[in-house]
Amino acid sequence: MKFKFGKKPSGRTPAAQPTEAQQVSRRRLLHSGAYASALAAIVLVVVILLNLVIGAIPTKYTEFDISTGQMFTLSETTVSMMKALDQDVTAYFLAETGNEDTNVSRILDRYAGESSHFSWQQRDPALYPTFADQYDAGEASTNSVIVVCGDNHVLVDYSDMYEYSYSDSYSYTMDFAAENALTTAIAQVTRENSYTMYSLTGHGESSLGSDFTETLSNAGVTVTDLNLNTGEIPEDADALIINVPQADFSELDADALRGYLSDGGKVIVATSLLYDTPNLDAVLAEYGMERQAGLLVETDPNYYAYRYAGTYLLPNVKSNTITSGLTDGMFVFAPTSQGIVTVEDEDTTQTDETAETESTLTHTTLLSTSDDAYSMLDYETATVLEQGENDPTGSFDLAVAAEDTSTGAKLVWINCGNIFLDEINSAVSGGNAQLLGSIVNWMNGEENNVVIDAKSMSAETLTVPSGLITPLGLLFVFIIPLAFLLAGIFVSVVRRRR
């Protein structure tokens, strides 16, 4: 028997080789897959780049402010300041991660969008527990902001970013005041000049209230007390303030004041009709200003405080360079005031009649009454508030600025003893402090920064007049639904007929 050795059949049919068409199809699928993968990668890269580009665009172009009162829309004052910014300013937002006040972060984004010199960073107190200490802000409340420029820094506390107005014990309105606080802080840290103001003492003068010293500090002015016991005013005195002296100046003190003014000094004087100061008044008279006898009484209700006597003046604030720092519509409160008479110096001729000398004094009215006011001459003995036969009537000035163009001296006299009291200032939401800050900026040659109004956070409600309630109810409840019902029936009938 013969045996034949060889490979045992496997029982499987050899795989058929792919045809040319199948190979072409596979190659197409492979190319399509590679193309799709490459396209997906390109799209992913483009999306990432697009997100980076959009993230770099200022939020004012990518986010629309639809809030009540335009809370996050910066005023022209802030925008102009940010565009002129030429120093790097960094704001550190002290907020816990996840508990940030988004109102503050959103407005910081708006600031960053207006200038490449401004940036902000968040610092979580839990992660950076000692960060605020290096800026003397260890006690700052959460969501506060530290504004830094070089070696200068200012804390904007969270409490300064909101204002509350209480109508009664149970209801209040809240305004967003972050823009004013942040803009003021940026102006402070970028200010190049600082000034020294001396507040005279020794004659029973009143100290400035905290509202006023804070306003001056924001303007770069440091207030220091000065007693003229040496008869000299320091050379570094950029300005003096004499706040309601109860005793008159000595001849030595009056001469020191004269010498300071003759050298181009700047002085603010506030006086009261309760105290006689003839030596001080003599210095004021040399600059063309004298007291109007009597107590100013206003008869126009638009010029005195509501429900108060006519002596609680809300005087007219004259519009000029000196008062330009007051917010439009802001009031100044001046209870118990006395008028100021401006005496314009007439031209005088020298004895040899060869030359003429003209006055170098100019006067600017800052505050005045209406034309219907009068000055009560016998106010000390009067029992009722009414005009006497001899009481002069008309418009009276109660704050006047005098400037000597030959020496550069600037002298502002406010004849009201209550003008620089905190409680008086708060009655007009800070108008008196704004007036002082505006005067000091004019004296120092600084541009006034207008105070920015807070933005209301209260939603405005739609009020429907009572006469329209019934017609609108019928319109929306019966007429409009009936019209839609009839239209539907008509459409159905037309379609069936077709």
Image: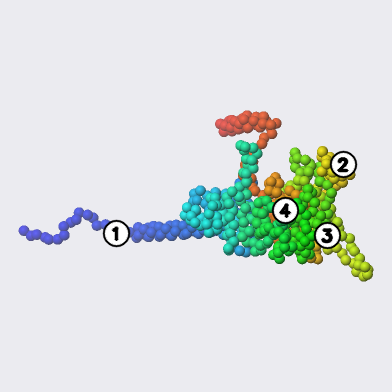
Question: 427 or 376, which lies in front?
Answer: 376
Q: Which residue is mark 2?
A: 388
- The quarter of the picture where residue 57 lies is bottom right
Task: Kindly indicate whether the residue at mark 4 contacts the one at mark 3 (C-beta within 8 angstroms).
Answer: no
Task: Kindly indicate whether the residue at mark 2 contacts the one at mark 4 (C-beta within 8 angstroms).
Answer: no
C-alpha span from label 2 to label 3: 31 Å
Question: 228 or 4, which lies in front?
Answer: 228
Q: Amino acid at mark 2?
A: Gly
Q: Which residue is mark 4?
A: 205
Q: Amino acid at mark 1?
A: Gln
Q: Which residue is mark 3?
A: 286
For the point 43% across and 57% down, the residue is: 36
Q: Earlier in the sequence, mark 3 or mark 4?
A: 4
Q: Earlier in the sequence, mark 4 or mark 1?
A: 1
For the residue carrying disc 1, how many other residues have a C-alpha within 10 Å: few (<14), some (14-19), or many (20+)?
Answer: few
Q: Amino acid at mark 4?
A: Glu
Question: Which dot marks residue 353?
Answer: none
C-alpha span from label 4 to label 2: 33 Å
For the point 71% across and 52% down, the residue is: 206
For the point 12% across and 61% down, the residue is: 5
At mark 4, the secondary structure is: loop
C-alpha span from label 1 to label 3: 119 Å
Rendered view: 313 above or below 355: above
At mark 2, the secondary structure is: loop
Q: Amino acid at mark 3?
A: Glu
Q: How far from the left and from the top, in percent, is residue 409?
A: 77, 62
Identify the coloring.
rainbow
Q: How far from the left and from the top, in percent, is residue 483?
A: 62, 31
C-alpha span from label 3 to label 4: 22 Å
Task: Kindly indicate whether the residue at mark 3 contacts the one at mark 2 (C-beta within 8 angstroms).
Answer: no
Question: Which dot marks residue 17?
Answer: 1
